[in-house]
């Protein structure tokens, strides 16, 4: 059963998970031999700070904040943590999994997603972001079991990084899980296998598992105690969304997500995706403008300070999918995929709203 589920998830990833790279570098090919033919890259040593993209007691890409941000970077005084799992940033074909000694890949991870996704949480929380032997972009299109084996292999590192964090740094502190795309595939497994129903789950503020659809029925079938976030300050729950333009066509993505759900749980009951709207900070299915003015993160990934937030788009949850206006402002350089898929921009279009909600949800946790 789990093998069939993993195969279905890899099919979903092939549709919705494209590497966060410049348009000229979308796909780097696929390894020319099966997974088992390659020597594995060396395992990360998570006691070595070089195995982490972000740690709260050093200067790194997670420390940035948009120019003039209303919510400043506050890791030095934060009372909660974030464990962040990045999306696919490795497009090499020399192996099915990245060697985390590859400085060029790590640098791109830092400036493309640690700075533009994980940093949204540095106003409330200390950021811990491991490098891991991520599956290459080519794993999405594997025609044998090499893709699912590569994802399994990457997940092994995620578990080790999580255990190191818990044993050495958590010290009973409240925490969030934050992830995107391939990172969300691993985060969902981590939630189910290592957190749900365990004592540490009592300290989980929320999980922002973004960029891969999560069916409503997963709450109760996969996750037994972690619930679905519905409101802005719910805690002990999980949040998910996939983003499309207002005229987007998410049908194939939704169907493949639902197929993976049916393959695993043997039913279509509860297969609708559990959409959460970052603009309204709710699961309500209606249109919301960004009236609070939290703003979007414009520009493109670069080793420079983040720009000031600009006017954010409105959005609505409809049939389990988040639909939003596609900004036409010259400040944005969006990579819009087929069918108006805004997978590349699940975070930056709503950066200010995510940042504000993370603070509000953390404050609510401490008031429980």
Image: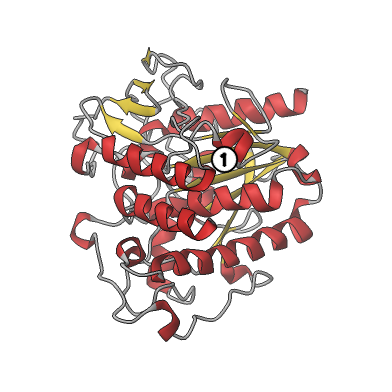
User: Badge 1, how many Cα within 10 Å: few under 14, some, many 20+?
Assistant: many
Seen from the viewer's position, the closer of residues 206 and 270 is 270
Residue 353 image position (x, y, % from top left) = 46, 27
Above/below status of 227 relative to 301: above
Residue 345 at x, y percent in the picture: 34, 40
Tell me if residue 132 can be seen.
Answer: no
Q: Position of residue 235 (x, y in %)?
A: 67, 29
Q: Residue at x 33, y 82 (%)?
A: 33
Q: Residue at x 29, y 33 (%)?
A: 244
| 70 w.r.t. 343: above or below | above
Q: Residue at x 23, y 44 (%)?
A: 335
Q: Residue at x 46, y 34 (%)?
A: 268
Q: Please, which colouring scheme is shown?
A: secondary structure
Specify whether residue 285 is in view: yes
Q: Is residue 43 found left or right of 314 in the rendered image? A: right
Question: Residue farthest to the front?
Answer: 266
**Which quarter of the picture shows residue 254?**
top left
Of 340 and 312, the residue lying toward us: 340
Q: Is residue 242 above or below residue 170?
A: above
* Image label count: 1
Is 39 displayed left or right of 76 in the figure?
A: left
Give how far across and how far down residue 341 sits, in percent.
26, 39
Q: Quadrant of the C terminus?
A: top right
SS at mark 1 in the image: loop
227 relative to 173, above or below: above
Q: Pointer 1: what residue?
A: 73
């Amino acid at each position: 059963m789990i093998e069939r589920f993993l195969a279905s998830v890899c099919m979903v990833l092939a549709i919705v998970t494209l590497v966060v790279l410049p348009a000229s570098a979308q796909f780097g090919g696929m390894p020319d031999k099966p997974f088992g033919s390659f020597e594995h890259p060396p395992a990360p040593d998570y006691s070595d700070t070089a195995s982490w993209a972000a740690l709260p007691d050093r200067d790194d890409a997670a420390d940035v904040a948009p120019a003039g941000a209303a919510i400043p970077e506050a890791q030095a005084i934060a009372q909660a943590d974030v464990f962040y799992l990045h999306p696919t940033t490795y497009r090499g074909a020399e192996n099915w999994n990245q060697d985390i000694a590859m400085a060029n890949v790590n640098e791109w991870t830092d400036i493309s997603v640690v700075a533009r996704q994980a940093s949204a949480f540095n106003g409330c929380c200390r950021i811990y972001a491991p490098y891991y032997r991520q599956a290459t972009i080519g794993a999405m299109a594997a025609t044998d079991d090499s893709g699912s084996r590569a994802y399994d292999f990457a997940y092994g590192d995620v578990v080790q990084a999580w255990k190191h964090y818990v044993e050495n740094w958590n010290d009973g502190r409240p925490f969030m899980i934050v992830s995107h795309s391939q990172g969300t595939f691993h985060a969902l497994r981590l939630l189910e296998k290592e957190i749900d129903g365990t004592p540490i789950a009592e300290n989980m503020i929320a999980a922002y598992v973004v960029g891969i659809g999560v069916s409503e029925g997963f709450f109760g079938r996969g996750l037994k105690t972690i619930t679905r976030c519905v409101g802005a300050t719910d805690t002990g729950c999980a949040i998910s969304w996939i983003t499309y333009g207002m005229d987007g066509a998410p049908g194939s993505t939704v169907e493949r997500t639902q197929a993976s759900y049916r393959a695993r749980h043997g039913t279509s009951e509860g297969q609708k995706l559990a959409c959460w709207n970052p603009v309204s900070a709710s699961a309500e299915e209606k249109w919301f403008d960004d009236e609070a003015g939290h703003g979007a993160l414009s520009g493109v990934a670069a080793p420079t300070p983040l720009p000031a937030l600009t006017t954010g788009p409105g959005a609505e949850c409809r049939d389990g999918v988040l639909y939003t206006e596609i900004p036409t402002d010259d400040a944005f350089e969006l990579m819009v995929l087929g069918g108006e898929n805004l997978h590349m921009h699940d975070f930056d279009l709503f950066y200010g709203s995510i940042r504000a909600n993370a603070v509000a949800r953390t404050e609510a946790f401490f008031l429980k």
